[in-house]
Image (cartoon, grey):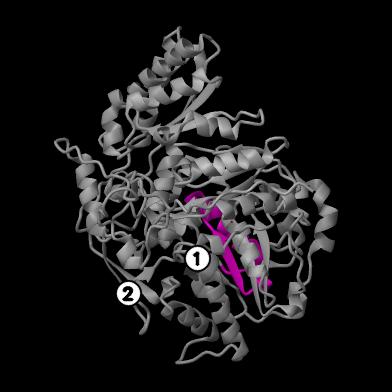
Amino acid sequence: MQSSPRSAESVFPLLEPLLPSVQKPIQYVGGELNSTQKPWDGAEVRWALMYPDAYEVGLPNQGVQILYEVLNERDWILAERTYSVWPDMEATMRKHGIPQFTVDNHRPVRAFDVLGLSFSTELGYTNMLTALDLAGIPLHAVDRGDEDPVVLAGGHAAFNPEPVADFLDAAVLGDGEEIVLAISDVIREWKSEGRPGLGGRTPRDELLYRLAVSGAVYVPKFYDVDYLPDGRIKRVVPNTSGVPWRVHKHTLMDLDAWPYPKKPLVPLAETVHERFSVEIFRGCTRGCRFCQAGMITRPVRERSITTIGDMVENGIRSTGFDEVGLLSLSSADHTEIGEVAKGLADRYEDSNVSLSLPSTRVDAFNITLANEFSRNGRRSGLTFAPEGGSERMRKVINKMVTEEDLIRTVATAYSHGWRQVKLYFMCGLPTETDEDVLEIADLAKKVIAKGREVSGQNDIRCTVSIGGFVPKPHTPFQWAAQLDHETTDDRLKKLRDNVRADKKFARAIGFRYHDGRPGIIEGLLSRGDRRVGRVIEQVWRDGGRFDGWSEHFSFERWESAAGTSLADLPVDLDWYTTREREHAEVLPWDHLDSGLDKDWLWEDWQDAIDPNLDVEVEDCRWTPCYDCGVCPSQDTEIQIGPTGLKLLPLTVV
């Protein structure tokens, strides 16, 4: 981990003459408004933060932006950012010997103490390997020396980091704001002691050991995985004294005390989200059985109306953005969303600032709320997510939205001037049949018919967007068999043909969907164990990059790599994806504690698939606790309003 001063020198003199030869060179230049420049020698701990995708996807990422600010606010910590480079830039860097670099000061990533990766999707794993290789960091953790940075993963995919365990030194579960500072303290202390190796451990292993025994950081090398002859996991056990049997997630309990990002980055190049986003609460207690984000971010913790107002004003002032998105898993569920909407609409009514709720639950939408957010004349489209096409499927997934709820909601929107609604569904859910999927078409037609009726207009549109269901760890559906991609594609074709065949509605219904094959690979990576690492590495060596992009994704490459890499094992691609798990099976992530009680998850799974049961789990913010386990096991509690606070008008200067 010790680097010579020369190794931290900027590579920009080498890079600059090559930029005209690559696409979108602006993404590699840095210098964005609100980026941080700090002297290298003045820092005791240095982080390279990476979102493993292209700049246009990575720069807007809230997680990286928050940690970038939190770390750089400490005068003894330096944090810079790095993103995945496109294949043309990768080839150029290899040809000219330029290592993976940060965009802030173009320093080599290998010179930093920590390379922190934020994984919101598993399809970024091959991009991580590209970055490690370009940086000159050995791919496998076991091959790294004391001069290499600690490779640390966070984000939602880190709740099962086992498929990339061979490539990671450590992983962190949950909220990052406090734990990155705690990790920095451990590194600072270890460095101040002269980077010791104690108890027969190398200096690098001593640092990892200190992180692991804190109970706050998962270090895969300190855990052994044993397998049964049939391929299932026998047990996961610590192999080092003092290392905890289970690693717990981190939960930030006072969001008002952490109003980040205070000065969001303003991109130089076009990005996927050209807006300033404010997270108005974390967590969700709706209990949708498919939703990993809703399960692993519990409990609900709201920001106060005054903090939200301050964050919006600070963000607008410091960035120049004229669109503000109020983000959470279900933004309209904030207990004071009506007051938030009215207060912000009052503040910015005669300005060019537009406000939006990117996605709204059908049963949380009301026209008063929608009108407040469109008061200044800009009216964004409305997006609702029924998820299941039939009433039966919505009960299976615990999406407590009836057809009447949906029709009533869209009727209200269309009657008040909206002309377009987007509906999001999933295909491949447990117990689903062809008929369940075809009911999506019936629902869309009813939406159009109702819109025409209440508006008296024929220019009514409804876009149906469909994603394939992928079972995720730490959810009641973590035991489910994934639907094979052939059946998924067949059902989607039947649905598309049904919509197109009805001349009365075909032109009014847009239809967007992805084929089932990328979902199968996401399923392999989301529920895989350490043996899947060899598949990921083979795909990468065969040229796999940017697997989250349809134009770069190759199912054949993944299928071939799985076939060859797993040939000597009693497991294969289908074993990881289309196989249903039993209650007694040890799951790859069982030693990683999201706070959820495994027996509660199993009982909820049984309720979902029992055709004779009609058990829906209510939102525990308004009902007695139903023992999911999070609050007692994590020593947390639901934090919601109303606070009684008011959003005062801005002072006019």
Crowding around mark 2 (Cα neighbors within 10 Å: few <14, some 14 to 19, many 20+) is some
CA–CA distance in space, label 2 to label 1: 21 Å
Visible in this render: residue 462?
Answer: no
Amino acid type assigned to the residue bearing label 1 in the image:
Phe
Relative to residue 614, is residue 456 drawn left or right? right
* Magenta segment includes 166: no
Quickly name the residue at label 2.
Answer: 245
Visible in this render: residue 604?
Answer: yes
- Quadrant where the image shows the N terminus: bottom right
Question: Dot 2: what SS?
Answer: loop
Q: Nearer the viewer, residue 587 or 14?
A: 587
Q: Is residue 88 above or below residue 78?
A: above
Crowding around mark 1 (Cα neighbors within 10 Å: few <14, some 14 to 19, many 20+) is many
Residue at 37% across / 24% down in the picture? 440
Q: Nearer the viewer, residue 60 or 460?
A: 460
Residue at 38% across / 46% down in the picture? 291
Residue at 50% across / 67% down in the picture? 168
Q: Which comes sooner in the sequence, label 2 or label 1?
A: 1
Quickly name the residue at label 1.
Answer: 167
Q: Position of residue 49 (x, y in %)?
A: 62, 63
Q: Which residues are magenta?
A: 110-138
* Magenta segment includes 126: yes
Q: Position of residue 330 (x, y in %)?
A: 45, 43
Q: Is residue 431 above or below residue 59?
A: above
Residue at 49% across / 62% down in the picture? 175
Q: Position of residue 399 (x, y in %)?
A: 33, 37
Q: Is residue 260 above or below residue 493?
A: below
Relative to residue 377, is residue 533 drawn left or right? left
